[in-house]
Every structure is written in structure tokens, then in C-alpha cells.
Image (cartoon, grey):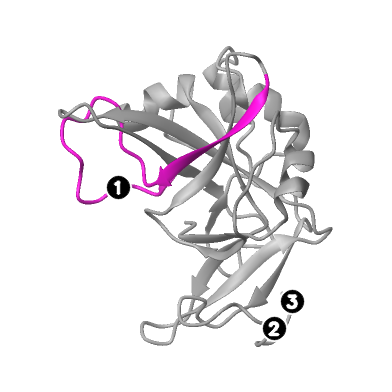
Amino acid sequence: MCGLYSLTIAPEAMRAAFGLAEAVDYPPRAVIRPSEPVFTIRRDRDGLRHAHLALWGFVPHWMKDWPARRPINARAETIFTKPFFRAAARHRRCLIPADGFYEWTGEKGHKHAWLFRRRDGRPLAMAGLWENWLGADGSEVETCVIITTGANADVAPIHERMPALLPSRAWDAWLDPATAARDAAALLAPAPPGLLSARDTGNPLRRPPGPQGPGDL
């Protein structure tokens, strides 16, 4: 699963990397946690890519009450069949930009996180879904979820799952709701081996990730 990630690239670099229609402004965050507002990238009605904030933790539009617990990950193998995600998987797909994601290893009480990044330093485009939830009092909240798939050779020594990372050539197809479910699902394969490197960051929830640890995996 993916329970923490980072977005520290400069806003203008993100705009250029993802071809956004407008500038975005945000403070860099080395550790992004569930329930926090995060950037999603969607194709709006004008046909262009725009950045939208959403809370990380998915709530389907049909749910009557705001749940105490909200899923932060959705399995690529079931998003088009599970009623919880099915409508969003067909009509509300997004990219979630990052420059790294964390996976944990070790025993309880002694866990530490590995930060995975692209070897070439370019940002990651994690496949996601978003939803607009309407409360009984008329309040509206947008939420999102990161899609996971089987781990590739880079991640498998640490964890059996990883975010579904989309190459730039797949972005338009993923964001287009006209793309058939079967074709969209085919985009969610594990990343090619050798794309990522990993660094042991200790516990990033206690201190900023640093160069400590045994180095690259």
C-alpha cells in the first residue's frame, strides 16, 4: 500500500512536467499523510489538465454520512467491479503527482520507511480516483484515493504492493472518461524494473527524511 508520499518539486516545475493549464502554488511537503489535502490532476471540460485539491481518503458520492474511516488506497484489480469505486473508476480518474512514496519495513515498534523515487529525478504520476461528496447540510467535499498494483522488482524486496505509476504517454487515456474500462485497467500494470531507487529514511513521521540509512536499494 501507499500510506505516505512526498511532493517537494517546485510549483513551476510541476506545471511544466504535467502540462497544467495554470500555475499552482503550494509549500513543498516531504511527508504527505492520509486525510490531508492533496493535489489531483484532472482533465476538465475545456479538455485541458488542471490541478484540484482533494482530501486523501475516498468517500463515494452516494454515501449518506461522512465515515469515520476512509480508504486511502484502491486495488487496481477491483476498482472497476467494486461498487465502492466503480463509478469513479469509470468517470472520475485523476493523476496524483509526487516525487516519492514511502513503504514500511521492520517489526512493530521498530518500523522504518523506504522512500522510492525515480532514478532520473522526474516526478511520479500516481493513478488515482476522485469523488465529490455532498453532505445532508449541503456541504461539498472532494476526496481521492491512490490506486495500487503489484510491486515491481524495485519495490518487491520491501512490499508486495506499490502505487500504479503512469508514464506520460498514458496520461491522456487515463484521464479521458471515454476510455473504456478494459483499456483503462490495462494501464495499471507495475512500473518497469529499474525505474525507481530507494533510500532508508528511518521514521519520517518523527523527523524530516534525511540521508541516514544504508543507502540505495
Earlier residue among tags 1 and 2: 1
| Relative to 112, 23 lies left or right | right
Residue 61: horizontal and vertical position, in percent?
A: 29, 26
Which of discs 1 and 3 lies nearer the camera? The answer is 1
Residue for badge 1: 70
* In-front residue for pair 126/37: 37
Residue type, numbered disc 2: Pro
From which residue to which does the magenta span run? 48-73
Image vertical order of residue 206 relative to residue 82, above or below: below
- Residue 211: mark in rendering: 2
Residue 89 appears in view: yes
Residue 91 horizontal/vertical position (percent) = 47, 19
Q: Which residue is labeled 3 in the image?
A: 216
- Magenta stretch prevailing secondary structure: loop
Distance between the alpha carbons at the discs numbered 1 and 2: 32 Å
Instruction: Report the Cα–Cα distance between label 3 and label 2.
Output: 10 Å
Give the vertical position of 13 relative to 100 (above or below).
Answer: above
Q: Nearer the viewer, residue 125 or 141?
A: 141
